[in-house]
Image (cartoon, coloured by chain):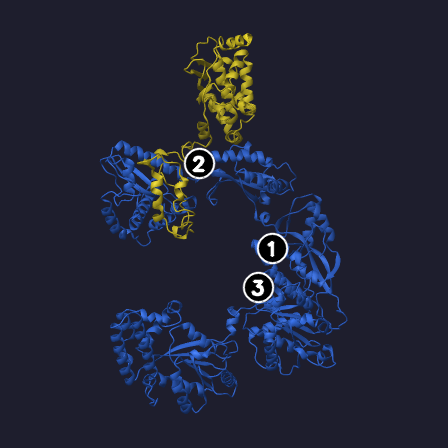
Chain colours: A blue, B yellow
Amino acid sequence: MSSFPSDRDAQIAVLTRQAGSVELAAGDRFGEVAELLVDAGRVVPGLTFDDQTGLGRSWWWPLPAASQRPLVASLVDDACIQGQRDAATRLGEAVDRIVRGRLAAARAPLGVRRSGRLTVSQAWCLSLVSADPWMSGSLEPAKVAALAEAVAAWVRSGAVIPGRVRLCLRIVELAAANSGGRPSGRAKAQPLWQVELLAQDQDEPSLIAPLADLWAGESPFAPSAIADVLGGLARMARLAPELAGALEEAKPDSVHVDSAGLVALLAERAKLLEDAGIAVLAPSWWSRPARLGLRAKLKRARSHDSAGAGSGLVGMDSIVDFEWQAALGERRLTKADLAALQRGAKAKQALVRLRGQWVRIDVDSIDQLLAKVGEESSAQARDLLKAGLGLGDLDLAPGLEVLDVDATAVRWMRTLLDGALHATVEAVATPPGFEGQLRPYQERGVGWVAFLGRLGLGACLADDMGLGKTAQLIAAMIADPANGPTLVVCPVSVLGNWERELARFAPSLRVLVHHGANRNVGDATLAERADHVDAVISTYSLLARDREALEGVEWARVVFDEAQQLKNPSAAQTRAAAALNAARRVALTGTPVENRLSELWSIMHLLNPGLLGPARVFKERFAVPIEREGDLEATALLRRVTGPFVLRRLKTDRSIIADLPDKIETVDRCPLTKEQATLYQAVVDDMLAQADASDGIQRRGVVLAGLSKLKQVCNHPAHFLSDGSALAGRSGKLSRAEELLDEILDAGDKVLCFTQFSEWGGLLAPYLQRRFGVETLWLHGRVRRPARDDMVRRFSAADGPPLFLISLKAGGTGLNLTAASHVIHLDRWWNPAVEDQATDRAFRIGQRRNVQVHKLVSSGTVEERIDEMITAKRDLAARAVGSGEEWLTGLSGSQLRDLVSLSAQAVAG
Amino acid sequence: MARRAWDDAWRRYPASVPLPAKGGIATSKQRGQMAATWWSRRFVAVLESYGLGARMQRGRRYARSGQVLALQVGSASIAAQVQGSRATPYLVTVTVSAPSDGQWVRIIEAMKAKVGFAARLVDGELPTDLEDVFASCGVSLFPAKWEDLKATCSCPDWENPCKHIAAVLYVFADRLDEDPWLVLELRGRPRDTLLETFAAGRSGLAAGGPGTSGGELEVAPWWPFAPGQRPPVTAEPASQITLAAGPPEGRPDAVLDGLDALDVTVGKAAFVEIIRPLYDHIAAPD
């Protein structure tokens, strides 16, 4: 579509050269602002006409949007006309330069066909994409001038000019001393309010000036603002008759109104005024009013016997006596406040000053409120808790609401209501009888489970996987023994795990597994057999099938492990779970909400029936607003309501990290021996020569093989040569490894050694065993599973072998080798993720001491260079390096040489 | 039949039937109620009180049928073209005796004493008590008698006011509904002059609206502050301003859609459409 003028390429060449010089001086504000405007596309073609020369000059002018005006204003040092012109010139020039630079760099085509004589508009077009903004002198000056005029008018039509001002009303409370100064026509006792009259920029609402300034001709607005304000005043008088007095004055700057007038203004007129283009700045006590309502001051909880169990538990069902008090927000009103309220109500005042702030009172409901104050009442703890958490209103008449529940007198309720349960609950030190040591965060978790348990309240322990939910629960069983057996319901897959963990952490507890075909062998009922044990482990599938037997037991505690299994409230197993007869309920899950909030409701309903109300109400109040509308208020309320009953810690929480042991990584640089250096050099020479002589897949093979050989040399000459020669004293790395092992084994610690070469492991294992006189476990790809499991078990045993040599590839997953407190990487795998995975075998939650990670690297070799690259850009390396060493094969000859060649300081001594 | 033909002929012949007017001024009467406001009704009442009878009635019909082609209100005068029975429209001028400058000084002083006068006028309403203000200065707000109006028309009719003059006055009255300032302009002081006076002597009131050239005071056509306006220089330094900039919203060339049409073509293509593709290379990609 485009045909360029013949000199266009030459122009582009000029422009391209210029584009390089467009770089802006540091701190050049004009340049920065210009760049932002250009980035935003806020530029338009412009044209000026020079009277002196008769020439036209094209421009790329900025055309700032309203929101960018402050940015432009910030460039003006002196607001006088000349100061503004200077700023405009500099900004205009900067924008022009940047746009021309970008157009040149992009070699942007222009759909202009030049035929015959150059017209003025053609010349303008071409000069806009040219390095030279000046238009040809052969054009008729009058035509250029006319076009410039038209262009200016066109640009002007899009320029944002803040001529638009609106009237703005701001409400100020008159100081009591001033209130006598003005005739109000009302009783002197009425407080007076001042409605300030202001002018506000419509596009920049922060720009406000009192009308007094406008009358005096001293405002920041264009003169036309006067007309806008005058019109606003007339509309204001029409819409808000209580302010009409302003029109009677010559230069009004404020209007005084009484409280009734103010309430009328804010409640009834504000919307109309806004619609008529008049802003109303309401005082904060109006726009964020403190609510007037009731608070329940708890007196005492009546002792409560639940279902004759004699448990002595106070809980959700207990009856609590309380007294109604008046409250403003969460603050109790004093007698003086009440008196003021009563006076106000009697005088039908719309505004009353309470606790230092103005409160609008609803004359109709205030009598109801006052009648309720002082009344004694009682309610179930559950309903009071709900009211205190912001759910439910204790059957108050419409128009009244519960703003607060003061639970000072009932300690357990206060603890739940003050919103800081997780922080304030007393940690339970690792109880005697628990085999092992709980971490601080686990002790807090046990304290929390025990606290809620003693109150008969359900708890959902939702810690991250790996933080030890099972251990915490077992500790809670010991710390809060309750009076009867605990039922653990879990998926079949973790049944064995529960059995093992119970035996490990709480060997004193008697455990019965209620599972399998022969679970009911014998005459004894489940209830009778459960009577003789401390814990019964069963599975979800049996919940419904053995419902009758399970319901027949008075459980002291029921634990639902992987409680997300109960997320469907209508499923048979969920209904069976709800029917269980238990004084304490605990749910364990890593994911309290997998997909929908209704899952949370289901679990919470099992734990604390009635707390979240019926499912239908929950859906209306929480699920729909939160899931569909992202309602933050509903989210906060739900968190507040469920907060005391859900404990969820993440591995990444600060407080948890502090409890976990540190991992300390060090890279040990080991010199090559002379023998190693000679071999290394020979391999390098051979590799580079072969690589130069080949290409494609063949070259790739050469490089990979070469790299592998270099690593072997770095490990040990015998590894590279495979000649069965002796190991001692011939490798820098091996010497360093021996030093480390000496230290580690002397300290009685255990260590994992990883290598990626099973040949090397095969040579090393017998050597180390002889050298240190300890059994060395050697796990490689050919070790069968039973033998492997045996190795893992023996290594984990306290008196087991301390040295475990593992082939990185054979290591596989599923190893839990937390007995080790040291990890040695004998050679490097150029993928940090693979190394980290190996390291993490030792660095697990069961780890009690710091883990020391030693990475051995031969200095001056390819190992060191790649290690530096990985250290410098660990994340990037993980991505670029991928899982293998393929990327190395793509390096050019000289890059490869730089990477592998031996540096001077490589050799020992 | 014959009777009807005669009828038609009678209608057509003697009464100098006006030619249909194209682009005549529509009175609100054609759309519904005419002279809806108290002041335009008052003006009409004043006209009709002159006792000119049938001529005024014919003028009202003229006004209703759109024979008034153009009407301009100047200081204390009205100039208009009316399509009569001849091809060339008649020219009508009405000059109104204005209060003296001294009287106006007193009127303006009185108006400035209550901001409501100017406010209501800006809001499109003639304050009801403005007549009292004029009266207190010894002047009538509306022309009190026919002799206060000096009207001429280029028609050959010997009657004054002729129906053309009357039509112009009706159209003017209709306009008063929309713009009460015209009542004052007819008495010699147009809106802008008065507003300027109210604004405590600030000048340049008329200038500064978007799209108007500020003349000497203009900084640049694109400058986002009105001529004569002082940008808020106390604003934070540029570095601290949260930038609303960034990639353009929507198309990179969206800025062009915020301008009026530009009547410039290059060859056969509109300039704006030629320049539009360049914005792909100008604005930052998002």
Upstream in the sequence, badge 1 or badge 2?
Answer: 2
Residue tagged by mark 3? A594
Which quadrant is the C terminus of chain A positioned in? bottom left
Please state the horizontal and vertical placement of residue A413, each as a whole percent of the image: 67, 65
Residue position marked by numbered label 2 in the rendering: A217
Image mark for residue A624: 1
Estimate the spatial distance between the alpha carbons at disc 3 and disc 2, rounded to whole Å.
65 Å
Which subunit holds the residue at mark 3? A
The chain carrying label 2 is A
Q: Is residue A426 left or right of residue A138?
A: right
Q: CA distance from mark 3 to mark 1?
A: 16 Å
Up/down of A298 relative to A496, above or below? above
Across and down, in percent, residue A23 comes to 29, 53
Q: Are marks 3 and 1 in contact (CB under 8 Å)?
A: no
Residue B106 seen by the camera:
no
Identify which amino acid the numbered label 3 is placed on: Glu
What residue do we see at 53% from left, 68% from top?
Answer: A650
- Sequence-wise first label, 3 or 1: 3
Nearer the observer, A273 or A140: A140
